[in-house]
Image: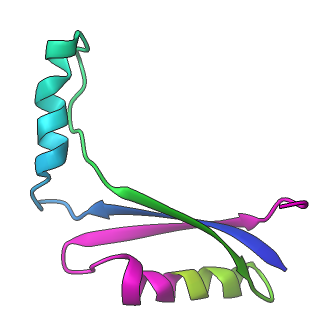
Amino acid sequence: MRFAVAVEVRGLEGISDPQGQTIERALPALGFTGASGVHVGKVVRFELEAADEPAARATAQQMCDRLLANPVIERAEVVVSPAERGE
């Protein structure tokens, strides 16, 4: 089976996020008020062939642990769903 995988990588709580801080400071100058706690991360999307959803999730988590995220300063959230047909 094919699965669509999305991995959201964000900095751990307490780790400095200079990009997020810069964006948060710039928003009011552009007329956007009320935004706070801005954080910048990355999303990695891909399709994965696996026997079932738990196997796809386990493989994606191993990818995070070994390559996609630095566990010292980042956390990764994995979302797995069946891939749409025709892709």
Q: Quadrant of the C terminus?
A: bottom right
Question: Residue 57: x, y in percent?
Answer: 62, 80
Question: Residue 19: x, y in percent?
Answer: 17, 46
Give 38 or 87, whichever is nearer the viewer: 87
Location of residue 15 (image quadrant) = bottom left
Count of numbered marks: 0
The type of colouring in the image is rainbow
Asked if residue 25 is among those painted magenta in the image, a careful observer would answer no
**Where 48 falls versus 15 (above or below)?**
below
Magenta range is 61-87
Q: Residue furthest front?
A: 87
Location of residue 5 (image quadrant) = bottom right
Asked if residue 66 is among those painted magenta in the image, a careful observer would answer yes
Give 1 or 30, whichever is nearer the viewer: 30
**Where 48 falls versus 27 (above or below)?**
below
**Where 38 falls versus 43 (above or below)?**
above
> Which residue is rendered at x = 21% and y = 31% of the image?
36
Location of residue 26 (image quadrant) = top left
> Which residue is rendered at x = 11% and y = 60% of the image?
14
Q: Quadrant of the N terminus?
A: bottom right
Q: Residue furthest top?
A: 31
Left or right position of 40 against 84: left
Left or right position of 16 against 32: left
> Which residue is rendered at x = 59% and y = 88% of the image?
59
Question: Residue 20: x, y in percent?
Answer: 19, 43
> Which residue is rendered at x = 38% and y = 84% of the image?
67
